[in-house]
Each structure stands twice: as C-alpha cells, then as structure tokens.
Image (cartoon, helix red, strand yellow):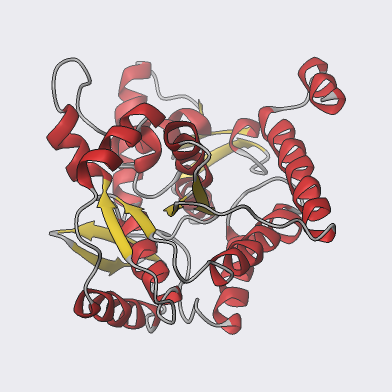
Amino acid sequence: MFRIKMMQESKNSPEEILEQLNSIYDRIIDVAQNENHVERDYSTVHIVCGESPAGSLRVGLGHENKIIGFPDFFAVGPIWELHQEVGRKNRHEWLKDHLNYSDDYFEEVYENRFSKTLAEIERLNGEVPIVIWTAENSNEQTGLRYLVYLLKEKKNDVFVINTTLAFQELFNTPEFGCLDIHTGEVNGEQLKKIYQANLSAPLTDEDRTRFEREWIELSESKGLVRIWENHKINNVTEGHFDDYIVNTARKLHAMQGEKDFMKSARLIGEIYGQYNQLGDAFIEYRVRSLIYKGVFEIKGIPKAIRYYSVKLR
C-alpha cells in the first residue's frame, strides 16, 4: 500500500506505474505459492483472453468463481505450434523484436505470466465446470480454440459464452447502446447478467474435437495476422491494413488544412477506434514499418507512441 501511495505521487508514466503494480502482484503471487498456499474450492472457473476482461469478471461474478485471464492477444503475432514450448519461444521472440513495450516487459512480465497461466490451467480440478468467454473478434475466437485444445485431457464440462451475441440480445437498447466487439468492453454487472442468462449446455465431445482440430490447423500456419470474417478465422499478411493506415493519415492531414506532423498516438488512436481487432501495439508496429519504407516522415524517436510524430511524404 505504501508503494502504491508513492506511485500516485510520482511523475512516472501510466505504463511505468502499471508495470510496477504488475510487479507487486507477481511478487505477492510468488510468496503465496512458496508458502504452499492451498487454493480454495470454486464453484466455476472462467477463462477469458486478456487481463482487463478478467478484472471485469472478478467484479461481476464474485469470489465463488475463479477467473483466469490469459495474458496475450492472439489476433497478431505467430501462433505456430503455440501449444508446444518451441512455438511459445518463437512467439515470444517475435513479439519482443517487433512490438514496442516498456523495457524488459517480455522477459520479466510476459513470459512469466504466460507460463504461470498455463500451469494454472493445468492444475484445474477435474470436477469443476469451466466457462470460456469469447466474442466476435479474431483474438477471442483464436483464444477459444487454443484454450479448448489446452483442456483436451480434462474431463471437466466446458461451456462457451459469446459476449457479443449475448450482449446484443440482452442490452442492445438505447439505454446501453451497441457493443463494441470485445469482452473487455462490457462491465462486470453486465457480464454477470450475461452469465446468468446464457449458460446453456456444455460443449459436446464433437464440439470439443472440432475446436481442437481447428486449433491444430491454425497452429500449422506461419501467418502473423488473423481476422474474423464470416464466422471464420482467416490469416492475412502483416501488411494487410497498411493501405487503411495510409488512407486514415490522409484524412487526418485533410483535417489539418496544411499537411503537418501529427502525433503517432493520434493516428494510431484513430485507426484503433475504427478497427480495434488488431490492437494498438501492432498498429504502431505497422506505422514504424511504413516509416522504414519511406511512406511516412518521422520527427522524434520511435521508442513509444508518445515520443514521435509522423506525416505522409
């Protein structure tokens, strides 16, 4: 608590503060595990892609439910053989070499959390029901198939809730507005209502086998970007959205009146606001790629989006 108070009074960036908080969290978990902490029994285990939606689920569902947030974003980056150590190492290296995160994030945070989450799933009691949350986007649909594959030796009943479809059915009114396409954009109380209204029958053996087979097909590809179209995950090239990035920059230049440098965060935020299946870190990587190709001029140092500006040549 003292450390948190110090952080509130510091001038560190939000990213640095978040990293420090995550470090504290990891140390607490390590202490609990090293003291042979016995995990309490839960009525249900919920698994979701991302730590933000996991937080919302914890708020909405209460302590009798165990929540696991898988610490990754499966829409971008290699997923080749991700269910094997060689594939996880390959993904880790690619993310480290291409995406801008704070210093040592991938070595000290990402890899550690990924391994711990796999171990947490492996330790799950064979009797407790498991709910996998997904939505109409490539990250969560890819994650759904990966998670079902990870559970292939488990005898637990596995349920799937599609947040997008459930939200549209329950809340698509003027009071709540329309859902964006990610589970993380639904608040805890709404997730609780979705859970109470949409838990139907568990996946059949045929359903589980189908998802496992679809994961194996996905994991055989060396593709780097996945999009969700017509209820199917499709692989596209990493430059698939480059034209969209350039056209968005043209529109922003037109709004300037006279073409001038714009903060890269402004451009990336505009693209993410219109098409948020990719994630802002990957969009920033593509902006840097277009700088290297000579499409954009740059002012500043591209070590993070707040440090540089761009304009079309």
Q: Nearer the viewer, residue 151 or 66?
A: 66
Q: Is residue 258 visible?
A: yes
Residue 178 versus residue 286 in the image, above or below? above
Q: Is residue 249 visible?
A: no
Residue ID at (16%, 60%): 231
Q: Nearer the viewer, residue 291 or 183?
A: 183
Quadrant holding the C terminus: top left
Quadrant holding the N terminus: top right
Residue 153 versus residue 3 in the image, above or below? below
Q: Nearer the viewer, residue 306 or 38?
A: 38
- Residue 164 coordinates in the image, percent (x, y): 23, 43
Residue 17 versus residue 134 in the image, above or below? above
Q: Is residue 161 left or right of residue 102?
A: left
- Residue 10 coordinates in the image, percent (x, y): 82, 19
- Residue 51 coordinates in the image, percent (x, y): 53, 45
Residue ID at (45%, 51%): 43
Residue ID at (36%, 27%): 189
Which picture quadrant has residue 237?
Answer: bottom left
Which picture quadrant has residue 90?
Answer: bottom right
- Residue 121 coordinates in the image, percent (x, y): 54, 66
Which picture quadrant has residue 122?
Answer: bottom right
Q: Nearer the viewer, residue 198 or 7?
A: 198
Residue ID at (59%, 83%): 86
State the count of labels.
0
